[in-house]
Image (cartoon, rainbow, N blue to C red):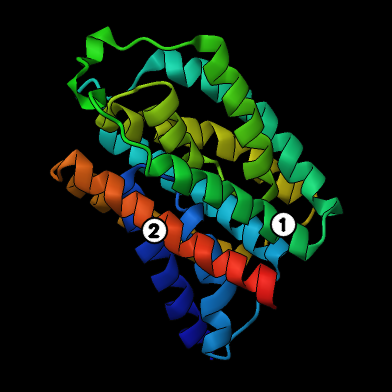
Amino acid sequence: MDFFFIIIIFLIGFVGSFISGMVGVGGSIINFPMLLYIPPLFGIIAFTAHEVSGITAFQVFFASISGVWTYRKGGYLNKQLILFMGGAILIGSFVGSFGSRLMTEGGINIVYGVLALIAVVMMFIPKKGVDDIPFDQVTFNKWLAASLALVVGIGAGIVGAAGAFILVPIMLVVLKIPTRMTIATSLAITFISSIGATVGKITTGQVQYFPAFIMVIASLIASPLGANIGKKINTKILQWILALLILGTSIKIWSDILFN
């Protein structure tokens, strides 16, 4: 049973981190529902929403580091975006993760469902001309970016995420950042956000370290592989992959909230 437990958790972490590295998210949008629903199917363990949020917060911290390392060259990272959005989301993620101890299981799932639903809507909004902007000519409203990052951080901190799954559509649709710069920069912001989320989850005792450690090992292997492949895939395909993933998880979460 222990060996089977390790294999299942490792595969969840590997698949989630590979896809997240490819599309520029920390992995929580994928790993949250997989950890919540897959282990019980095999009769291994049923994690609570608090435990899942703690494990994903811990895993995202390491997955985002390896993803950023892969994108560190090539001019993909926008330092101003990282500074303004990273600082705001760090504060928000700590507040959200620390306060999540006071929430019910259903409350955490609802927050996740709302974030996923918003992200789905934004991902399907047309993004004409975004990828025609040269990297050295990218501009954005700094205080709007920081304000949005703060709000996203609070919600993402609650569910143990770093918020990249909603940061990506915000950066594409609202801030008009090119796709490849969005993917790379969102991973850097995700790393900063995950610091606040992880600290909040650890200090409130919501992290199960053994499965979290397995997820981390899987992340360190899979996230760079996904990021390298993501560099070679058409940006429109990457956007559709992320949109469909978010849509699928949103449907599953909301069906459980409304009908169970």
- Which residue in the structure is indicated by mark 1? 108
Question: Residue 249, relative to residue 76: is it above or below?
Answer: below
Residue 88 seen in render: yes
Q: Could you tell me which residue is drawn at 42 percent across and 33 percent down?
A: 186
Q: Position of residue 214 (x, y in %)?
A: 49, 66
Residues packed near mark 2 inside 10 Å, few (<14), some (14 to 19) or many (20 plus) = some
Under circle 2, the secondary element is helix
**Residue visible at 19% across and 14% down?**
134
Query: Relative to the observer, which residue lies in front, 140 or 35?
Result: 140
Is residue 147 positioned above or below 136 on the image?
below
Q: How many marks?
A: 2
Q: Residue at x 46, y 31 (%)?
A: 170
Left or right, residue 225 beside residue 210: left
- The quarter holding residue 146 reads top right
Q: Position of residue 206 (x, y in %)?
A: 74, 58
Q: Secondary structure at mark 1?
A: helix
Residue 108 vs residue 250, the one in the foreground: 250
Amino acid type of the residue tagged 2 in the rendering: Leu
Q: Earlier in the sequence, mark 2 or mark 1?
A: 1
Give how far across and how far down residue 18 sits, in percent: 32, 57
Would you call the spot at circle 1 few (<14 residues within 10 Å), some (14-19), or many (20 or more)? some
Q: Is residue 3 above or below residue 246?
A: below
Q: Is residue 100 left or right of residue 230?
A: right
Q: What residue is rendered at 47% in x and 86% in y? A: 4
Label 2, on which residue?
Answer: 245
Residue type for callout 1: Ile
Q: Is residue 47 visible?
A: no
The answer to whether 115 is drawn above or below residue 209 in the figure is above
Distance of label 2 from label 1 (alpha carbons): 20 Å
